[in-house]
Image (cartoon, rainbow, N blue to C red):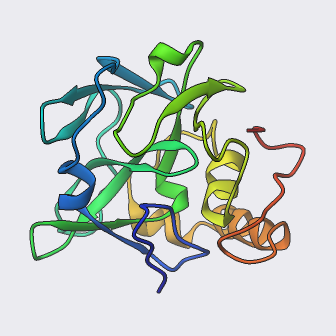
Amino acid sequence: MSTRSSGHGSPRWAWLLGTLSAALNVSCGDSNPDVLRDTTGATFSWTCSLATCTVEPVDAPPPAQCNDSKVFYSYLWGNFFEVCSVVGMDDGRSWFTNGSLCRFVVCDSDDECPQLPNAKYACSAGLCQNVESKGEVHEAQVVALCMAEEPRPSDCQAQIDDPEVSAQFARARENCESPSGPCTVPAECRQP
């Protein structure tokens, strides 16, 4: 299992354990859009107060079901800004996801990108990218870029068992020096 405190995705099928409280209990920047749009065209409301930011589906499918677990949408920020279907942990504060359950936030201009105090995003190649790490990609992000146009899954186990999804992770591994990168994005996938 691989976890990263920066909120990045996970390699292959190792699930990312994200701390929901860390993801939500950040002070959001001053200039934020009201709505986020992902690579599938799904839209999400983006609401920030002094101490928290939340993402809620507007015109998006329900988050991928995972047996009887609590599922919802949350977000990851790192090199890119991603909206992910996540599974809540029993502690009520943490969650996990993987690259196949995340989609990047897309944009036509900088003002469509969310802002966080520790991460500033700008529109580059139609994706909200961190201005300090633009173009850097790790393994789970290669998966999300290669699955960018794929509809969001309705079931997490079916997604795990899908041979096409396994092939995406294998292709990502072939294009990365390590799970944390650096990686190249295959030509047939969305380019950052």
| Residue 138 or residue 88, whichever sits in front | 138
In the image: residue 5, left or right of residue 168: left
In the image: residue 190, left or right of residue 184: left
Could you say which quadrant of the image residue 36 lies in?
top left
User: Going by the picture, which residue comes out furthest to the right?
Assistant: 187
Q: Is residue 48 visible?
A: yes
| Residue 15 or residue 131, whichever sits in front | 131
Residue in the image at 61% along x and 62% along y: 140
Residue in the image at 54% along x and 17% along y: 110
Q: Is residue 58 visible?
A: no
Residue in the image at 34% along x and 40% along y: 117
| Residue 157 or residue 148, whichever sits in front | 148
| Residue 19 or residue 50, whichever sits in front | 50
From what the image shows, is residue 62 above or below residue 3? above
Q: Position of residue 163 (x, y in %)?
A: 67, 68
From what the image shows, is residue 93 above or below residue 110? below
From what the image shows, is residue 159 above or below residue 83? below
Residue in the image at 80% along x and 66% along y: 171
User: Going by the picture, which residue comes out furthest to the bottom?
Assistant: 1
Q: Position of residue 147 (x, y in %)?
A: 65, 47
Quarter of the picture containing the C terminus is top right
In the image: residue 178, left or right of residue 4: right
Q: Position of residue 44 (x, y in %)?
A: 32, 27
Q: Position of residue 60 (x, y in %)?
A: 35, 30
Number of disc labels: 0
